């Protein structure tokens, strides 16, 4: 009699579990999860292409950036802060592109950095940044950090000056004291044979030095807050 009772209880338990499983197979609830992801900061350009330049030439541009309309609208009425940092990181050499003396990191090739030949002056600064203040990080070279505020200060800019370097033995043998132009070392440039005045009376062939320089400037959002700029 006791054995039969125990057996009956076990059978009842199995039937209850099977019933729950059957209900779960035919009944469910859908939760719709979605999000619109957008950057908080937008920049006025994707690149600053200088093309071919010549030693001691100076080029300038102002790169503007600011909070997106979506970010300002989302936090309208609040003092909202976007903290950011400006980095310079190695510029990769695209597949099929040949550049002079690329820098190899891991299995990839990168341009020689153009950062040593740039002067960077953020908005509100009376003089360019001191390169001695730049910090080397795992991500890249940190040159500047600041914040944007909505709606008080939604835009900013950084003025960039490129002073094309010289070649040793050409133009000046050392740093130009007037323009402060650095001189490339032999490890930083290549030479190519060119025919000058091809077909003219003074036709001749010579070796012309050249260098390929490049970097990627990244404006990285580092955090958000509700702080007042005052």
Image: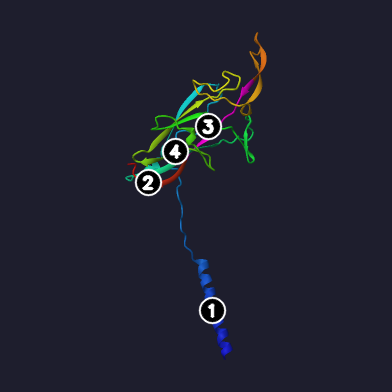
Q: Which residue is mark 2?
A: 74
Q: Residue furthest bottom?
A: 1
The residue located at (53%, 67%) in the rendering is 25
Q: Are marks 3 and 4 in contact (CB under 8 Å)?
A: no
- Camera-nearest label, 3 or 4: 3
Q: Check disc 1 and report its element: helix, strand or loop.
A: helix
Q: Nearer the viewer, residue 12 or 53?
A: 53
Q: Nearer the viewer, residue 47 or 87?
A: 87
The residue located at (60%, 22%) in the rendering is 168
Give the magenta part as a residue range: 208-219
- Camera-nearest label, 3 or 1: 3
Quadrant of the drawing holding the C terminus: top left
Is 207 located above or below residue 87 in the figure?
Answer: above
Q: Check disc 4 and report its element: helix, strand or loop.
A: strand
Q: Which residue is mark 4?
A: 42
Name the quadrant containing residue 175.
Answer: top right
Q: Earlier in the sequence, mark 2 or mark 3?
A: 2
Q: Are marks 4 and 1 in contact (CB under 8 Å)?
A: no
* Label 1 packing within 10 angstroms: few (<14), some (14-19), many (20+): few
Q: Which residue is mark 1?
A: 13
Query: How far is the residue under mark 1 from the one under mark 2?
Result: 54 Å
Is 83 located above or below residue 179 in the figure?
Answer: below
Q: Position of residue 191 (x, y in %)?
A: 65, 23
């Amino acid at each position: 009699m006791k054995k039969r009772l125990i057996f009956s209880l076990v059978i009842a338990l199995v039937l209850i579990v099977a019933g729950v499983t059957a209900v779960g197979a035919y009944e469910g609830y859908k939760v719709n999860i979605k999000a619109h992801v957008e950057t908080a900061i937008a920049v006025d350009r994707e690149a600053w292409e200088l093309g071919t330049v010549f030693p001691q030439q100076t080029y300038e541009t102002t790169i503007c950036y600011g909070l997106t309309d979506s970010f300002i609208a989302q936090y309208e009425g609040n003092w909202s802060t976007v903290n950011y940092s400006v980095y310079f990181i190695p510029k990769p050499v695209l597949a099929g592109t040949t550049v002079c003396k690329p820098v190899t990191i891991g299995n990839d090739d990168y341009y020689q950095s153009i950062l040593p030949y740039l002067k960077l002056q953020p908005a509100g600064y009376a003089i360019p940044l001191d390169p001695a203040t730049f910090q080397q990080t795992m991500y890249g070279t940190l040159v500047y950090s600041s914040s944007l505020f909505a709606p008080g200060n939604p835009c900013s800019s950084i003025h960039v000056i490129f002073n094309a370097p010289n070649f040793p033995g050409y133009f000046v043998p050392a740093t130009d004291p007037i323009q402060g132009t650095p001189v490339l070392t032999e490890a930083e440039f290549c030479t190519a044979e060119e025919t000058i005045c091809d077909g003219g009376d003074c036709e001749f062939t010579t070796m012309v030095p050249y260098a390929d320089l490049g970097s990627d400037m990244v404006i990285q959002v580092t955090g958000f807050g509700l702080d007042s700029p005052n």
